[in-house]
Amino acid sequence: NAGVTQTPKFRILKIGQSMTLQCAQDMNHNYMYWYRQDPGMGLKLIYYSVGAGITDKGEVPNGYNVSRSTTEDFPLRLELAAPSQTSVYFCASRPWGALLAKNIQYFGAGTRLSVL
Amino acid sequence: DAKTTQPPSMDCAEGRAANLPCNHSTISGNEYVYWYRQIHSQGPQYIIHGLKNNETNEMASLIITEDRKSSTLILPHATLRDTAVYYCIVRSNYQLIWGAGTKLIIKP
């Protein structure tokens, strides 16, 4: 199993450009998450999904959009890139039906994004 | 905001036990304590979790105080590869609220 795969690994954008960060998991997990991590800080939740067709906002959703058309994929869209979106983005997943006792998330390797 | 408090950094000698403390004084009765670590900009990795009993797995041990207001993650024989940022997290709904963690440096 590949686990959680994120592409690209690195990207430089100009202000105002748009891009999609890709995330795919092959573990048949229902829950998927997008986080951002600024230098020296913990992770902040952007969006999450509890299954195909269902998404919800996290702590810092402004400037981002998501969709979930399949169980496997959960892309994150930046429409008008701003310097404040310079960060490392992590995608994670966890299985459905896991009790609150087993909120174990599996993470991808991250996408490092710079907006200049 | 994160509901946990951790020291920003700690050192430990290679081969010794690393004891990482975490305060979670506002934890409620049904909230679990989770520990993850992040090795130099990689994606976080799950270590262990617990409710009120002490827990042990192949990676670490978790000691939770009887009042559940604090916990300690123990890496029994730290190696250089254990150098990482360690996050103590109290589950909030289905979201994990991440603080800044403890940067653990293992010294040879």
Image (cartoon, coloured by chain):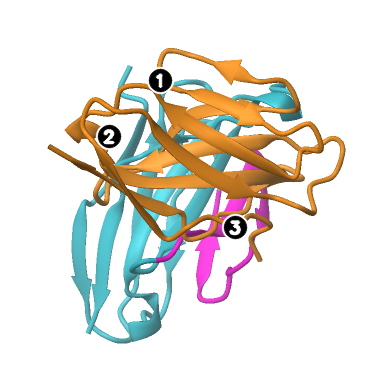
Chain colours: A cyan, B orange
Local crowd size for mark 2, using a 10 Å CA cut-off: few (<14), some (14–19), many (≥20): some
* Labelled disc at residue B5: 3
Q: Are marks 2 and 3 on the same chain?
A: yes
The kind of residue on which mark 2 rests is Asp
The chain letter for the residue carrying disc 3 is: B
The chain letter for the residue carrying disc 1 is: B
Residue of label 2: B82
Q: Could you tell me which quadrant the C terminus of chain A lies in?
A: bottom left
**x and y percent of residue B82 in the render?**
27, 34
* Nearest to N terminus: mark 1 or mark 2: 1
* Labelled disc at residue A57: none
The chain letter for the residue carrying disc 2 is: B
**Residue B62 visible at all:** yes
Quadrant in the rendering for residue A32: top right
Local crowd size for mark 1, using a 10 Å CA cut-off: few (<14), some (14–19), many (≥20): few
What is the magenta range?
A41-67
Residue of label 1: B59
Q: Nearer the viewer, residue B29 or B79?
A: B79
Residue positioned 80% across, 54% down in the render: B26
